[in-house]
Amino acid sequence: MKTHRGFLMVWVLAGITVILILAGSVALTLSQAMRREVRMEIATDEALIVQEALEQGKAAVRFGTPLSIPRDIERNGRTYRVDFHQEETAVEGAAVIRLSCEVTHESGETYRAETLVDR
């Protein structure tokens, strides 16, 4: 009878060990998935802010309206810094305006885009 109890104890300990390993693996996988989801949300927010700023810049150039893009934008509870630059340049002899926008998150992740607009 004592040998059966010993084997039962070994099986119980082995089962608990397997369950703890599986639970740890699941917890690690979930935490990585959540961190990746946050990074993807930040990247999406940055891309959308850049797109919106460049569209406003193109409209301001085409219609001659003043451009007002805030320096700091809060979206989804996160703060982003927006750097918008406009410079006149020439491409193959044609005068164009280069609009560039860079959005930076508090964590240091940055998204940058540029476009050229006819005068």
Image (cartoon, helix red, strand yellow):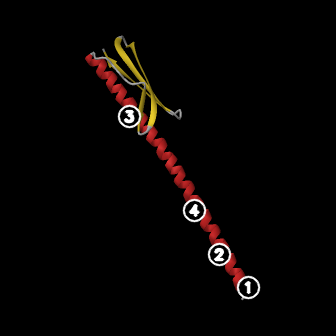
* Cα–Cα span, label 3 and label 1: 67 Å
Say which residue label 3 marks. 48
Mark drawn on residue 3 = 1
Horizontal side of 56 relative to 8 (left or right) equals: left
Mark 4, other Cα within 10 Å: few <14 / some 14–19 / many ≥20? few
At horizontal 70% and vertical 85% (from top left) the residue drawn is: 4
**Residue contact between numbered discs 1 and 2, judged by CB atoms under 8 Å:** no
* Cα–Cα span, label 4 and label 1: 30 Å
**Residue farthest toward the left in the current orientation of the protein:** 63
At horizontal 47% and vertical 46% (from top left) the residue drawn is: 37
Say which residue label 2 marks. 12
**Residue contact between numbered discs 3 and 1, judged by CB atoms under 8 Å:** no
Judge whether 1 appears above or below 102 on screen.
Answer: below
Mark drawn on residue 23 = 4
Residue flagged by tag 3: what amino acid is it? Leu
* Cα–Cα span, label 1 and label 2: 14 Å
